[in-house]
Amino acid sequence: MKRVLGVLRSPVVKWAFLALALAFAAYFVGTRWNEIVAALARMPAWSPLLALIASAVYVGLTLESWRRILHDLGHPIALRPAVALFGVSQIAKYIPGGVWNIAAAADLGRAHGIPARHSVAAMTVALLISLVSGVGIGALGFLIAPTPALADWAWLMWLGVPLLVLLVPPVMNRVIGFAWRVLRLEPLETPGGMLSTRGVGVATLWAALAWIVAGTAVAALAIGLGAPATVHTVIQCIGGYALAWVIGFLFVIAPAGAGVREVVLAAALAGTLASAEIVTLVLLSRVLLTVVDLGFAAVGGAETRLARRRLRAAK
């Protein structure tokens, strides 16, 4: 088992997976190019625009969830420096490995007076909350609006619903404490060694809203490509995207869930859209979210440079 894990952690394997995912993506796009172009031509302008705006709001809500945890750890941070720190660090998630954005946040946090261990703790806890809420919301979405392609996995969805209990602040605090003991990390320097009930609750609320908005972005694209403009479609997209993100994240050798997330999202929408439209949707969804990530990084980089100039001018 150790040998297997060692192979999976190998940078060569991770970069090879990225190359393979890109190769498959290029193949699927190439074989359906004419259909994709036709689907894009039929798509109304409001659809990708709304999806882009919703994607930006989604990233902003995940930022707020992380910022709430950081505040609870004793490091309140204003919005502008928060965007600088969070925006730049998130670009690292596109590097194979799955943890580089946490490492980047720890390094960048020092410039804002945040100890590395607290930066790591804040990003890790925010990620844990995002994962648990993603599983719960994804499972609920599927059970409310099931899709034929995932019908055989319905039993697994039912197992995901009880995980919503983990989002109750006292329960989440116990999960965090257990995780810290297993990982042999120093206790969090907060009253009682844990996060406050209010802090965990607010962070969870932001994370849950983030999933709803992210799914709405996918729904905007789906409806623009011909899916029925119904509540069923929206719920299907919310649940499908949440599950796709969680599975893509857990498949650690895929940078930013590349390839895996798209396959799961396509399965979640099977039967709602034709194959060419699904390919168009998953590609557009990935492109728009990448554009948003790059936008946050650009704003964060600009804010960092301005902060350095203000610091030099004050000396």
Image (cartoon, grey):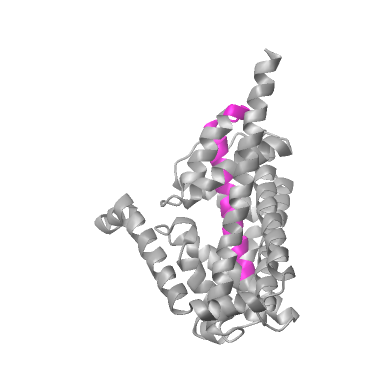
Residue at image location 74% in from the left, 47% down from the top: 198
Residue at image location 49% in from the left, 85% down from the top: 152
Provide residue 294's location: percent of width, then percent of height: 58, 49
131 in the magenta segment: yes
2 in the magenta segment: no
Q: Position of 313 compared to 32: left or right?
A: right
Position above or below: 149 against 242: below
Provide residue 195's location: percent of width, then percent of height: 65, 43
Provide residue 185's location: percent of width, then percent of height: 48, 39
The residue nearer to you, when weighing 178 against 246, is: 246
- Furthest residue in direction top, as rendered: 315
In the picture, which quadrant includes the N terminus?
bottom left
The residue nearer to you, when weighing 306 against 201, is: 306
Residue at image location 63% in from the left, 39% down from the top: 300
Residue 198 can be seen, yes or no: yes
In the picture, which quadrant includes the C terminus?
top right
Residue 192 can be seen, yes or no: no
Position above or below: 187 against 14: above
Q: Main secondary structure of the magenta part?
A: helix
Position above or below: 292 against 144: above
Position above or below: 273 against 245: below
Total labels drawn:
0
Q: On the image, which quarter does residue 207 sit in?
A: bottom right
Q: Position of 213 compared to 241: left or right?
A: right
Residue at image location 65% in from the left, 17% down from the top: 312
Q: Which residues are magenta?
A: 111-138
Provide residue 110's location: percent of width, then percent of height: 56, 29
